[in-house]
Amino acid sequence: GSKNANDLTADSRSNTSSEDDKELPASEKSLLQKIVRTGLITSKHDIEVQRQDPKSPLYSIKSFELLKLHPNLLKGVYEMGYNAPSKIQETALPLLLANPPQNLIAQSQSGTGKTAAFVLAMLSRVDPEHQYPQVVCLSPTYELAIQTGEVAAKMSTYCPNIRLRYAVRGEDVEKGSKIEEQIIVGTPGKVLDWATKYKFFDPKKIKVFVLDEADIMVDTQGHQDQSFRIRKLLPETCQMMFFSATYTEDVMRFANAIAPMSVIIRLKREEETLDNIKQYYVNCNNKEDKYNALVNIYGGVTIGQAMIFCQTKKMALWLVNQMVEQGHAVALLSGELTVQQRISVLDRFREGKEKVLVTTNVLSRGIDIEQVTIVINFDLPVTVTREPDYDTYLHRIGRTGRFGKKGIAINLVSGHSDHILLKHIEEHFCKPIECLNTDNADDME
Ligand code: ADP
C-alpha cells in the first residue's frame, strides 16, 4: 500500500478487491464523490504555499466581500449557501483574481472547494460584452465537465450575459460558424478539435485556461498531450489554473509544464479516524446466520441509514435478493452499473428512499453520507492474499472530521479465520471491537 496519505491514486490501486469486482476508474470515483457530497470537507491542516516567483503577492481572505466581485456574482455565491471561503479558497481566490493574473497550481482532496474557486475566477474574468470564448476549462470526462458547467450555471444565475458552451461528445457546432459563448468547458480532445481542426474559436483570445482533475488526466491516454497542444495555442498572457486531488511526481511535472511560475498551494488530506466510532462484532455460523443478525440489527435501528459491505458481487446480490424477498427496501451499488445507474442509486439513498445500501469494494472511500449511522461489514475486508485489508476497513468505517458525529460499525464474523482477521484489525487500530448479541435488543441501544 501507499505510505503517502495524500496520494489517492496510489491508494486506490492498492485496494485489492476480489477479481469479479473491479475497481472503478478514478474519474468515476471522483464523479460519484461529487454527487454524494453534501458539503465541504473542512480541514484542520494549514495551507502550504510555495512561490516560484517570490514577487507574487500572497494573502488570504476570510470573506467573499473582500474579493470585490461583481455584485451579481457575489449574489450567486451567497445563494449557493457559501457564507465564507473554504480553506483552499481563502488563499486561492486572491491569487486567481489578482492583477496582473497569477498562475496557480492547487492540490487538495476532493470536496475542499477547488471547483467553486476556479468557477468563481472564470466567471469574474469574463467580459460579458464580448461574444467569443475567453475561458477554457478542461475536464477528464463528459460527466465531470457537466458537473463543472452546472456549478458555473448556478453561480452565474444573476449574470445572464455570461454564457457557457460544452465541448464534449454529442455537442456539435455548425461547420464554419464561430462559438459566441464566453466559456468553454470540455474534454481535451474535443476542445483541441474545435480550436485547431474546425477553428470554432480563436485560442489567442483565451484569458483563462483551467485544467481540472489533473491527476485523472495524467492517467488517461492522450490527455496530457492534448492539453499541451491546446496550451501551446494560448497567448503568453493567459492565466493558467491547475487543480489536482493528488500530488505525485507525474502530476507535478504536468503542472509545471502547463502552469510555469505558479504559486503552488497544497492542503493536506484530512485523515479518516475511528475515534468516534463504536465497533462491534457478531458471532455467526454461516451466511444465513449473518443474514439473520443483519435483519435483527436492521430491526433495532430506528434512525439513520445503514451501509453494508460485502467482499464479492455475488454475495452482495445474494444478500439483496434475500432482503427484497422479505420486503425490505434496499439499494445495491455494484461495479457493473452504468454511471447513470450509480448516480440514481446514490441519489435515492441520499434522499432516504432506501434505508440500506449494499455495496462491494467499488466505493469504500467517498460515500461519506451524513445520515449513515451504521456501517456493517457483512464480510471483513481482505486483500487477494486474504490478509486483513486495513486501509479498506478504515475507509469503510472511518469518518473525516467534518461530521464529528458518532457512528457504529458492526462486523459479522464466522469461523476461526474471521476471528483472526478481527484480532488483527483490533490490534492494528488499537481500538476495541466488542461482542454484540443481536438476539438481545438491549444490546442494540
Ligand atoms: P472540489 O472541487 O475540491 O472537489 P467543490 O468545489 O466541488 O470541491 O466543493 C465541495 C462541496 O462544497 C460542494 O458541494 C460545494 O458546493 C461546497 N462548497 C464549495 N465552496 C464552499 C464554501 N465556500 N462554502 C460552503 N460550501 C462550499
Image (spheres, rainbow, N blue to C red):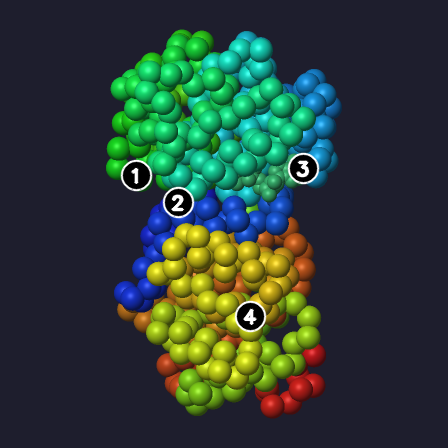
Taking 272 as reference, is 370 left or right? right
Q: Note whether 317 is above or below 21 in the view shown.
A: below
* Distance from Cα at disc 4 to Cα at disc 1: 34 Å
Q: Earlier in the sequence, mark 2 or mark 4?
A: 2
The amino acid at mark 1 is Thr
x, y (%) of residue 385? 28, 69
First reached walking from the N terminus: tag 2 or tag 1: 2
Whole-percent x and y of residue 334?
Answer: 40, 63
For the residues labelled 4 and 1, say whether their Cβ atoms are less than 8 Å apart: no
**Does residue 249 show up?**
no
Q: Are marks 2 and 1 in contact (CB under 8 Å)?
A: yes
Quarter of the figure with residue 248: top left
**What's the residue type where badge 2 is placed?**
Ser
Judge from the rendering whether residue 358 lies leftward or rightward of residue 199; answer left or right.
right
Cα–Cα gap, marks 3 and 2: 25 Å
Q: Residues within 10 Å of mark 2 (few under 14, many from 20)?
A: many
Q: Earlier in the sequence, mark 3 or mark 2?
A: 2
Quadrant of image for the C terminus? bottom right
